[in-house]
Image (cartoon, helix red, strand yellow):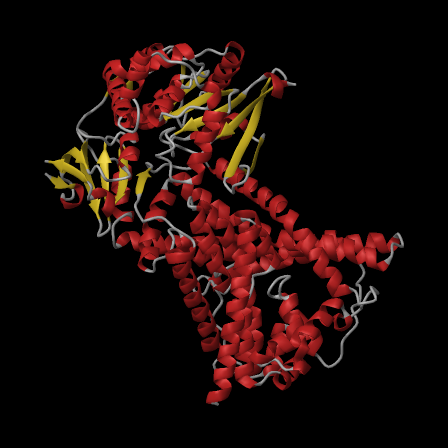
Amino acid sequence: MNNLLLANTNQDLTISQFDENSNDNHQLLAMNFGVGSKVRILQKYSDAVIVAKDNMRLVLSSDIASKIFCHY
Amino acid sequence: MADQKFPEISLIGNPNSGKSTIFNLLTGKNQKTGNWSGVTIDKKSGFFESKKEKYQILDLPGIYSLDPSISKSEDEKISQKNIIENKDQIFLNVIDSSNLEKSLFLTTELIDLNKPMILVLNMMDLADENKIIIDIERLSAIFGIKIIKMNAKNAHIDELKNAIIDICQNQTLPKRGVEFNQKITEAINIISKKTDLNKWQILEYLKKLQIKSEEIIDFSTEEKEIISQNSGQKIDFNIINDRYKFINIIISSILRKNSNFTRNISDKIDQIIMNPIAGIIVFLATLYLMFFFAINIGGAFIDFFDIIAGSIFVDLTENIFTFLNFPKSLIIILSHGIGGAIQTLCNFIPIIFFLYLFLNLLENTGYMTRLAFISRRFTKLAGLPDKSFISLVMGFGCTVPAIMSTRTMKNFNHRIITIFMLPFVSCGAKMPIYILFAAAFFPENGQNIIFLLYLTGLILAIITGIILNKGFVKSDSGSMILDLPAFSIPKFGIIIKESYLKVRNFIFGTGKNLIPIIMVLTMLNSFGTDFSFQKNNENSILSKIGKATTPIFYPMGIKNDNWQAAVGIFTGMFAKEVLVGTLDNLYRDQISEDQIDDYNFSSDIKNAFFTLGNNLIDLSNQIIDPIGMKIDKIEDLKMESEKQEIELSTFKTMREKFDGKIGAFAFLLFILLYSPCMTALATSKKEVGKKWTILSAVWATILAYIIAVGFYQLGVIIS
């Protein structure tokens, strides 16, 4: 299990866990970005990632992405 | 009246769900923008009429949830507060059909509030494009809510208006909301039997376990046990999970979609414009276009507005009241005071209109969110607020639209920091001052001096931003969740209308602050200490103040016999370029008496169109040098004086009065850095309030004084 930041571009992933200490879990959940969500990494930057889920495209800063765990 | 009979209809939805388009379609021309009470966040309201009845529509800022712990920005908090606290309202919940699961989360929360509600399935064309098929009738039957489908091509606006009229009359409530797990449901049932709280309020009560004194009721021990077992922070995630379980059950019965991931057109565009390298090129090109569009193209219309407004509000007013034999002092207050302030305000109309035209275009295409992300990558390097880069670039043109562009920042502290930074960015109005001094003191290397001034200002702006961002004004941690909207082709009519509303808001909002200030300054500049009208500025109260305060500027090289420079600092507060006129007027050998030319409106109109034509033709010369920094080496002072319309003797007197190049540059440093003009201050007051405006002006002026004095004293010691 890796965090989102370590995944490769164009890789399909399933969200498996959130860091409980993150303050942003509520917002991500409200945006339908919860455990079990199937996502794809579209672009990676040194400080952020762009993630696709269905028709939603989210930019997550690296501190948030590093607290979202996933499996391939 | 209809306003009392019918409740307010609130447009609610996720950001980028297309609420504003629906708002525009519903209200047409009948809309206005203002601020929400106590904050500078746009409040858009309007109405439509049917059978002589008015239906009030309120466009609320986009939110994902009603949960206050989720909202980070002021506009989301405003939206939540309005939805929760405003009792007499009807919800018009706008949903992005291509993202139904995400959008329905908010819908289920709204249903829990138990208010009359209509669902608008927007962006149906996007859903079709993505091969998403929604059983609308079934969805409507499940919730017991009327559903209207909308898309960009076929708006169904009449159907929506009829649904609004119908629900206002029948007050139909939703029939079914989320079915939470058994334990939570049991707790909800116990509380709902003994209170008037709706389901959403009960859930909030359970989460916080707090209740207002008037709502305290007796529960049995057993009931208290059930409530306490299903309360507190721990049920937060259970509630969210139950909502999504419920949504997923609905989705499985009403929606069919292609589950394979495909890159859509927006993804393909994003591959280029969000690319780490190409994205920065597109970003810089966009900023250049924004600057050129607002400052150069918009600026080409300034003379036109200036001449027309001056002709009507100043000259015509002066002529009418002179003809009516009004006292001279009253004529000056009415024409040059109130009329002059309106003229000043009118000068900003074209650049603000063109700025908002461009910003609205970016917003409506979906690029603005991307711009915020890429801008952040620049500003983060220097530890500055997101989007401040955009305002700083605008600041090189004019501080007023630059201050107004801070409204695109959701974080209020970011706005404050940027407004503190902006006075140091050299605006276009300071250029005539630089050129005047370059011609008088630095004819060989004027361009380098001007570049040095621009650079000094930028460095001080960045230092100010870093100091405030790190310590004084608390900013956010830098965490970011950005929802990128799909790209769309904007509706030009809507962009024009939104830009017009922004200009109208500027005229009435800023005008309210500006007119009294300009009036007072005009009176101080036109009357002597005995309140008699002064034909030349030398004997005015403002000049007397300038003369009295000259010793303050002595440490930066302004000697007592150079009181004209001190007066110029004060008149520069009208508008920076006014300082050139003041110095020319006070330094020249003979003060020519102002002659009132015969008023000729048709000649003014001709002149206005003539300057407009010339300015538009001149635009091609500004493509490479939009700021106008390139000035030629000044070899013939006489020619330069004719070019700048400055008396030749002015240059001679300036050389005598200032303490050489060091004194002149110290003065330029002060002019570069001190408080922005009155229009900028009035705009700032409207955006961040009186306290921060005064503080930013004081900070800029103190820093200007310290740097000018420091430079002069050091220069004198070294030389």
Q: Give the image location of residue B450, x and y in percent.
A: 48, 73
Q: Residue at x 66, y 83 (%)?
A: B653
Would residue B207 be found to the left or right of residue B425 on screen? left
Q: Residue at x 49, y 13 (%)?
A: B167
Q: Nearer the viewer, residue B61 or B318?
A: B61
Would residue B437 be found to the left or right of residue A10 on screen? right
Extreme-right residue of the structure: B325
Q: Nearer the viewer, residue B268 or B344?
A: B344
Q: Give the image location of residue B227, x and y in percent.
A: 31, 18
Residue B463, located in which quarter of the rendered image? bottom left
Residue B597, located in which quarter of the rendered image? bottom right
Q: Nearer the viewer, residue B206 or B66?
A: B206
Q: Nearer the viewer, residue B556 or B367?
A: B556
Q: Give the image location of residue B398, x and y in percent.
A: 52, 58
Q: Give the image location of residue B297, x and y in percent.
A: 51, 55
Would residue B223 be found to the left or right of residue B590 on screen? left
Would residue B380 be found to the left or right of residue B85 on screen? left
Q: Residue at x 89, y 55 (%)?
A: B325
- Is residue B603 visible in the rendered structure shown here? no
Viewport quadrant of the N terminus of chain B: top right
- Is residue B538 visible in the rendered structure shown here? yes
